[in-house]
Image (cartoon, coloured by chain):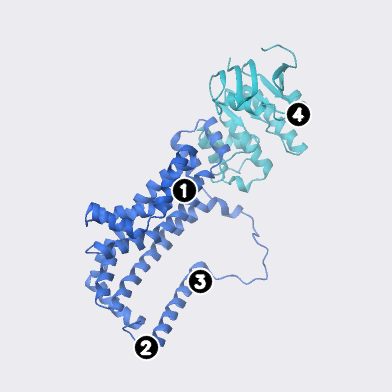
Chain colours: A blue, B cyan
Amino acid sequence: MSVSEETGPIARRGTALVPRPLPGWAVRVLSLLGLLTFWWGLALLKADPMVLPGPQAVLPRLWSEAVSGALWLHLGATLGRVAQAFAAAMSLGLVLGVLMGLLPRLNRWLDPWLVFFLNLPALVVIVLCFLWIGLNETAAIVAVAINKIPLVTAMMREGARALSGPLSDMAQVFGMSPLARLRHILLPQLAPHLAATARAGLSLIWKIVLVVEFLGRGQGVGFKIHLHFQMFDVTMVMVYALSFIAVMLAIETLILQPLEARARRWREA
Amino acid sequence: MSLQVALRSKRFGPSEVLRDLVFQVAPGEVLAVLGPSGVGKSTLLRIIAGLDRDFDGQVRRAGRVAMVFQEPTLMPWRSARDNLRLTTGVDRAQADAALARVGLAGKGALYPGQLSLGQQRRLSLARAYAARPDILLLDEPFVSLDAALVGEMLALTESVIAEQRPATVFVTHAQDEADRLATRQMVLAAQASVCASGRRFA
């Protein structure tokens, strides 16, 4: 599909006197630099690296972890779990949510379940999965997915309830195939809900993955944080926390935002 | 016969909206369905289109169906050209020809949101045209348009029907539109249908 940018309205907003705002990436970089300065200021104020090490203490340790390869091993393990749990939770939640949104009778039966699972504390699910399935990878991913599925389901149900009846009538009259309807009628309408769910989901999932690793895994960012927590090594806790936040920031900027912009293209044309 | 309808009864809960309607529409014929609002014109069209299957009776549709709705009912996230291609399966050249037919030449890459309401209506007409239907269903396609646009749309619809000769059912509440397009007219009144013009079709 081709997009003709030049045919859009020329003067989208009549703001000739307002100065041009900074480009998005510049604001992002400046904002993150501000956060770094804030942290540095706090560390200087506290003046106790055992409690709050500043960037000058954390960055060299980060470097040595990266050079030794340990950082990549644990980041990779955590990222793998995040990816698997994310894929499972999104696909199951999407199907369940759309079905509940489209079938009021099914929704009446499943809604109490949804409320139950939405309010089941993450920690309880994790402990039960480890007890029932064992201290293994399956339990870890199942536990995270179970924590996340209800939220995806609830959000996708809202999306499915807002689906356009006239458009699906049109697709039916013109005899569009089920696959074409999914791709050109259903998914474009669900896209904003999917994007919001993916963003909310990703940040929630990696936090739960860390708890799972904290409680019962021998690899991963959560495991390292547990290890250094026991040794009161705040610097290393921050090394691992910050590096994983950096990874998630990169995923958000390089994958999620471009995907969202692509799905939103027609609105801005 | 492209379209055969033998409707015994259609109910919404306890109230019966349509009863004992038997008619056929041949290729090239335009049957106008008139009547006050709420009498069941749109319900009848939904039954003919196969969108409403909860009725007592039989509808036989032979061949391809296309419909022009009250609203343009376009996919806002697909370009004008793709709105034709994805629904009717025509290729790029045929889609562009259909666009040109309704005066939208060169607008194929635009999204529906970039078109004026009149252009969106014409795009929805182009979609029905591109489908080369055997049965064409029009559900008050000119309602809430200004007089100039109605005239333009009527002329377009007229020429499309003359060219492709589908069996057409045209739901409207405007007698002048019916007089212009229809070869036969049917007036729906509450609880009963009345034949208003020319030949009998019951």
Residue under numbered circle 2: A47
Marks 1 and 4 on same chain: no
Frontmost of labels 4 and 2 is 2
**Residue located beneath label 4 in the image:** B174
Circle 3 residues within 10 Å: few <14, some 14–19, many ≥20? few
Q: Kindly identify which chain the residue marked by label 4 belongs to.
A: B
Check the image and report above or below for B19 versus A87.
above
Secondary structure found at label 1: helix
Q: The numbered mark 1 sits on a residue in which chain?
A: A
Residue occupied by mark 1: A156
Q: Chain of mark 3?
A: A
* Sequence-first tag of 3 and 2: 3
What residue is at 51 percent from the left and 67 percent from the top? A24
Residue type, numbered disc 1:
Met
Q: Amino acid at mark 3?
A: Val
For the residues labelled 3 and 4, say whether their Cβ atoms are less than 8 Å apart. no
Q: Kindly indicate the quadrant of the structure image that contains residue A42.
A: bottom left
Give the CA separation, mark 3 to mark 2: 30 Å
Q: Which residue is mark 3?
A: A27
Cα–Cα gap, marks 1 and 4: 42 Å
SS type, badge 4: loop
Rendered image quadrant of residue A80: bottom left
C-alpha gap between disc 3 and disc 1: 32 Å
